[in-house]
Image: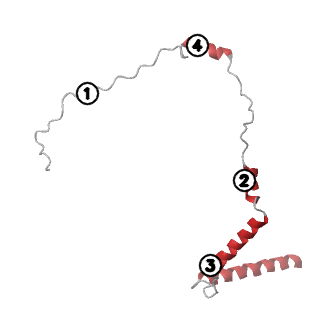
Amino acid sequence: MVSSARIGWYGFGMRWTDLMFVAVTLGSCGGPILRNAPQPNTAKVAGVAAAAAAAVTLADPNAAQRNVEANKVPDEKKPQKSGPSVPADVLDRLESNGSGSQAAPVTPAPPPPAPESPPDLSGVRPLRK
């Protein structure tokens, strides 16, 4: 047997789902739902927004500067711990192989050979000018 509390909650959920289904169905069919609703004058809305911004600025003119300074990253760098050091035997092996700064310079690869002769263009017409 199901308690009445669960039935009440289920009933509320179903009513809410039904209401959303009707709203979506009506909104998707035909034109927009609010097509006949009055639209505000954009100049008046812009004026109200500018007046609100001016009032906030007059109330606290330095608020924007404080926010910038609070979010500013400090110029000082924090000291970092160094990672593990290279063992001495690795450095000895590098020096013995000659791959350090004392090693011989690397020679570049030779350029590819030039073509033996230019292509035969005797049968080609010259371009018109």
At mark 4, the secondary structure is helix
Q: How many marks?
A: 4
Q: Real-space Cα distance between discs 2 and 3?
A: 31 Å
Q: Are marks 3 and 4 in contact (CB under 8 Å)?
A: no
Of the two numbered discs 3 and 4 on the same chain, state the one appearing first in sequence.
3
Quadrant position of residue 2? bottom right
Q: Secondary structure at mark 1?
A: loop
- The residue identified by callout 3 is 43
Return the residue at label 1.
Answer: 114
- Name the residue nearer the viewer: 87 or 77: 77
Looking at the picture, how far across and down is residue 116, in whole percent?
20, 27
- Kindly report the distance in space between the C-alpha atoms of the residues bearing marks 1 and 2: 64 Å
The kind of residue on which mark 4 rests is Glu
Asked if residue 3 can be seen in this view, the reply is no
Q: Nearer the viewer, mark 1 or mark 2?
A: 2
Of tags 1 and 3, the one toward the viewer is: 3
**First along the sequence among labels 2 and 3:** 3
Report which residue position mark 2 lands on: 68
Q: Residue at x 76, y 58 (%)?
A: 62
Name the front one of labels 2 and 4.
2
Q: Name the residue: 68% across, 18% down.
A: 87
Distance in Å between CA atoms under marks 3 and 4: 78 Å
Q: Are marks 1 and 2 in contact (CB under 8 Å)?
A: no
Q: Nearer the viewer, residue 55 or 129?
A: 55
**Dot 3 amino acid type:** Ala
